[in-house]
């Protein structure tokens, strides 16, 4: 039995109610609208904000792990069920800066598949796929067999895809690879070019920081290059709310308020920028926070741009304005900051 059917069994009553009352309850949605909210965003920046990095500052870990487990997931059907997932995983030695790269795959079948080989790239690469985890769920009519496998991927292939992702026509394309199974049909997976590019940039930046350490007062040692440069330029791409979009980002931003307030109070400007980019909600509050962070780091021109965007959002009718605003009085405080910075400018 597939994960989709199992999920369908568990929520079918509620789903039926949703269909029956759809006309009367406009908030009862059966599909996700997040993709339409992100059509205009730079996908490399979006994925860069979702990359997970572990092991930095942990003296009991010899390696830094970077992964894209929170990035692209292919969702099936009205229930938006995820299965046969794949993501990138890399390790960096803290002593040498040497890096290794993997693709992590998850498959579901009615019986054991026993993955053994991966085919990818141009020219074609074939390499061993190692089965590292398995589980079986027989709580329903049939059993679902879950198998995880990883394979090493050549950095040259990742560099090739990252270079292709720089072109606007390739930003939304996918890289395809195949897992060959001993006892089931082979499975093809896709990973977005932009996700690969963001991952490789993060890996390269961390590896370089170990081999050639930058001054400790540099604020962006741990941010992906594309993300840090966009912040410094004042061009971070946030989702501006309208009557028809921005609801998903707004929901995520509400859960981040407490953490953002803590980062603000601790003057952790890099952490604040990363937290905002995790949801990318572009209301007046979050543009103001970007302005505060930019000002705190000494990027005056960027701070001015973000304060101006905060004022612009505050002046929009109906949308773009926060309610509690984390205690800020907006747009007055953004306007005061602009006046102060213009007065301090030579």
Image: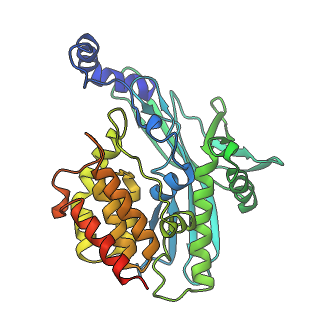
Residue at the spot 62% in from the left edge and 38% down from the top edge: 189
Q: Is residue 62 left or right of residue 287?
A: right
Q: Nearer the viewer, residue 172 or 286?
A: 286
User: How is this picture coloured?
Assistant: rainbow
Looking at the rendered structure, the number of numbered marks drawn on it comes to 0
Residue at the spot 42% in from the left edge and 52% down from the top edge: 238
| Position of residue 235 measured from the top left corner of the image (x, y, whole percent) | 50, 60
Residue 108 visible in the snapshot:
yes
| Position of residue 95 measured from the top left corner of the image (x, y, whole percent) | 57, 84
Q: Is residue 166 left or right of residue 248?
A: right
- Quarter holding residue 248: top left
- Quarter holding residue 267: bottom left
214 to 87, vertically: above or below: below
Q: Nearer the viewer, residue 47 or 24?
A: 24
Q: Nearer the viewer, residue 183 or 1?
A: 1
Residue 275 visible in the snapshot:
no
Q: Is residue 27 left or right of residue 141?
A: left
Quadrant showing the N terminus: top left
266 to 253, vertically: above or below: below
Quadrant showing the C terminus: bottom left
Residue at the spot 45% in from the left edge and 87% down from the top edge: 217
Residue at the spot 40% in from the left edge and 72% down from the top edge: 294
| Position of residue 46 measured from the top left corner of the image (x, y, whole percent) | 49, 52
């Amino acid at each position: 039995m597939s994960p989709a059917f199992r999920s369908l069994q568990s929520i079918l009553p509620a789903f039926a109610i949703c269909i029956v009352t759809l006309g009367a309850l406009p908030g009862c949605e059966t599909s996700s609208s997040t993709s339409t909210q992100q059509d205009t965003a730079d996908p490399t920046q979006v994925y860069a904000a979702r990359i997970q990095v572990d092991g930095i500052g942990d003296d009991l870990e010899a390696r830094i792990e970077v992964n894209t487990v929170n990035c692209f997931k292919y969702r099936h059907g009205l229930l938006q069920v995820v299965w046969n997932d794949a993501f990138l995983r890399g390790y960096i030695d803290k002593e040498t800066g040497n890096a290794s790269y993997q693709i992590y795959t998850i498959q579901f079948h009615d019986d054991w598949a026993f993955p053994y080989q991966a085919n990818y790239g141009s020219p074609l690469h074939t390499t061993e796929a190692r089965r590292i985890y398995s589980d079986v769920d027989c709580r329903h009519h049939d059993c679902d067999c879950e198998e995880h496998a990883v394979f090493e991927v050549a950095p040259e292939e990742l560099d090739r895809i990252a270079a292709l992702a720089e072109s606007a026509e390739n930003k939304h394309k996918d890289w395809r690879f195949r897992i060959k199974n001993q006892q089931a049909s082979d499975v093809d997976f896709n990973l977005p070019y932009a996700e690969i590019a963001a991952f490789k940039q993060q890996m390269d930046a961390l590896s370089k920081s170990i081999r050639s350490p930058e001054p400790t007062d540099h604020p962006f040692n741990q941010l992906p290059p594309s993300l840090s440069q966009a912040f410094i330029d004042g061009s971070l791409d946030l989702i501006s709310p309208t009557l028809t979009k921005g609801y998903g980002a707004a929901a995520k931003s509400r859960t981040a308020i407490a953490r953002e307030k803590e980062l603000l109070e601790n003057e952790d400007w890099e952490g604040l920028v990363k937290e905002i980019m995790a949801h990318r909600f572009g209301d007046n509050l979050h543009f103001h926070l970007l302005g505060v962070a930019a000002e705190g780091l000494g990027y005056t021109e960027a701070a001015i741009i973000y304060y101006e965007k905060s004022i612009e959002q505050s002046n929009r009718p109906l949308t773009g304005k926060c309610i509690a605003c984390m205690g800020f009085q907006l747009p007055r405080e953004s306007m005061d900051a602009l006046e102060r910075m213009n007065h301090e400018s030579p």
